Image (spheres, rainbow, N blue to C red):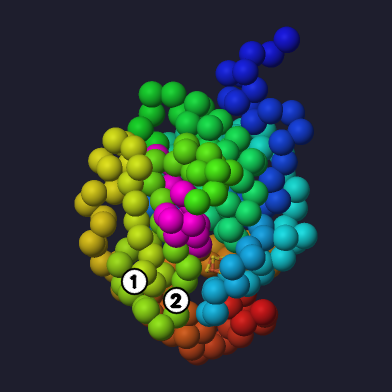
Amino acid sequence: MRSEEEEVRDGGPGWVARISGVHFPVTVLGPGRRLGIWFQGCPLACAGCMSRHTWDSAGGRAWPVAELLALWRQALAAGAEGLTVSGGEPLAQPAALARLLAGAAGARGAADADLLLYTGYTEAEIAADEARTLAVGGADALVTGRYVAARATDLVWRGSANQRLVPRTPLGAARYAPHLTRRSGPRALQIVGRGGALALYGVPRPGELDALEVELGEVGVGLTDPSWRV
Ligand code: SF4
């Protein structure tokens, strides 16, 4: 008989999340080298979203939470300074997200690796829904709110000026206080070759995607089906 603590630590049998992708190390979505996990499925449909490939809730792949937590433990052993969960909309799968964050908090032990969650919902929308409230309970910090293309910003790790970086725990406050009003550098994107395609991680500065496409074109690399024009 497994204890409840063991169940949470391991994600529990049968707990599965629909996931768009994972990557380590991610260096552009929170402080330090991080494990990135992107949930699949988003009902919010922000105009100008750069991740339209994550909208379809039937896309991506089913991924046991226990396996995601195993990746988190591997990343911690490799020196990960945090976990960033993004999407898609993670709160569209609140039960699996709650399991993932609770398990990730348990697995980090005494390490001060923080858990950062991106969501398109506002704090008020989260507070108004019990499942969402429970799901964000394990996060040290949130980035909240829809992407609004008309409100471009260079605030680090946010795509538009309405989005808020919200520390929720003492660890979150300590790690994110230096970044609440910090501006991103000239390049906010991390580019990784993956399976014959280019994967872009991060929150682009205003105009960065267009500039990148031009630069790639100048060296003979054309983009087919970029995720912001799907
Ligand atoms: S920006 Fe985020 S919340 Fe908005 S449609 Fe894209 S994935 Fe969904």
228 shown above or below 191: below
State yes or no: residue 125 in magenta: yes
State yes or no: residue 200 in magenta: no
Q: How far apart in space, not on screen, are marks 1 and 2 (Cα)?
A: 8 Å
Q: Answer yes or no: is residue 60 visible.
A: yes
Q: Which residue occupies 26% across, 55% down? A: 179
Instruction: Please provide the residue range marked out in magenta.
Output: 114-127
Q: Residue 148: give its label.
A: 2
Q: Which residue occupies 75% across, 48% down? A: 62
Residue 55 x/y as whole percent: 66, 67
155 shown above or below 31: below
Residue 122 x/y as whole percent: 45, 59
Of the image marks 1 and 2, the number of the one nearer the N terminus: 2
Q: Quadrant of ligand 1?
A: bottom right
Q: Residue 101: give its label.
A: none
- Which residue of the protein is positioned furthest toward the front in this rendering? 128
Q: Which residue occupies 72% across, 60% down? A: 57
Q: Left of 143 or right of it: where is 97?
A: right
Residue 161 x/y as whole percent: 34, 71
133 shown above or below 164: above
Give the crowd class for mark 1: few <14, some 14-19, many >=20 residues within 10 Å. Answer: some
Q: Quadrant of the C terminus?
A: bottom right
Q: Which is nearer the eye, 197 or 188?
A: 188
78 shown above or below 193: above
Residue that label 1 marks: 161
C-beta proximity under 8 Å, tags 1 and 2: yes
